[in-house]
Amino acid sequence: MCVEACVTDLFFEAAHYTPVNGVPMLHGHTFKLSVCVRGELSSSGWVIDFGKLREIVEEVIEPFRYSLIVPSKDKDTINIEGNFRVRVVSIDAPAATGECLGLDICSKVRNKLRDLGFKASGVSVELWEGSENYVRLSC
């Protein structure tokens, strides 16, 4: 029997740029994340311990906290100066859209699960940009 185990209400603040009326505009969000892992029940009766899944997801999203998320092709062209710290994090994607960020998070969670020996048959992510817009995807 395939079961999903999910954690929700994981949050991080980050900025990115996406086209607004055809012009790339820098802006930020409070991102909200839910992650589900599909798999068979273990002999102990669960797919994955909720605490362990939350820990894995927190490790994946930590680099994005208070950062500017950019596609890797743009990383070396970013130049922001001021009396503040700037952390630029790149994702291997054509753009830093919610869809691409969600896929990046999903694949990183899936890879961490695999590296830790979990036999998940799939991972799904719901990533909210603010309170009104979100993407839902599986990897």
Image: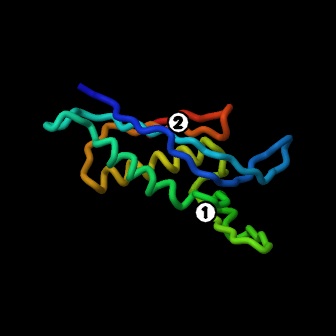
**Quadrant where the C terminus lies?**
top left
- Which colouring convention does the figure follow? rainbow
Q: Residues within 10 Å of mark 2 (few under 14, many from 20)?
A: many
Residue at the image point whose x is 28% and y is 35% from the top: 39
Q: In this view, does 118 lie above or below 69?
A: above
**Residue 73: x, y in percent?**
66, 62
Q: In which quarter of the image is the N terminus?
A: top left
Label 2, secondary structure: give it: strand
Callout 1 crowding tier (Cα within 10 Å): few <14, some 14–19, many ≥20: some
Q: Position of residue 120 (x, y in %)?
A: 30, 41
- Distance between the alpha carbons at the discs numbered 2 and 1: 20 Å
- Give residue 21's position: percent from left, percent from top: 86, 41
Secondary structure found at label 1: strand
**Residue drawn at (51%, 35%), measured in percent from left and top?**
137
The extreme top residue here reads 1
Q: Which residue is drawn at 67% across and 51% down?
A: 95
Viewer-closest of 12 and 80: 12
Q: Which amino acid does label 2 sit on?
A: Glu
Residue behind mark 1: 89
Q: In which quarter of the image is residue 72?
A: bottom right
Tell me the tag on residue 23.
Answer: none
How many numbered marks are there?
A: 2
**Is 126 left, or right, of 123 in this rendering?**
right
Q: Is residue 38 left or right of residue 125?
A: left
Q: Is residue 85 above or below residue 124?
A: below
Residue 126 got which mark? 2
The residue positioned farthest toward the left in the image shown: 43
Is tag 2's residue or tag 1's residue first in the polypeptide sequence? Answer: 1
Residue visible at 67% across and 66% down in the picture: 75
Q: In this view, does 52 lie to the left or right of 137?
A: left
Q: Callout 1, which amino acid?
A: Val
Where 58 sits versus 6, above or below? Answer: below
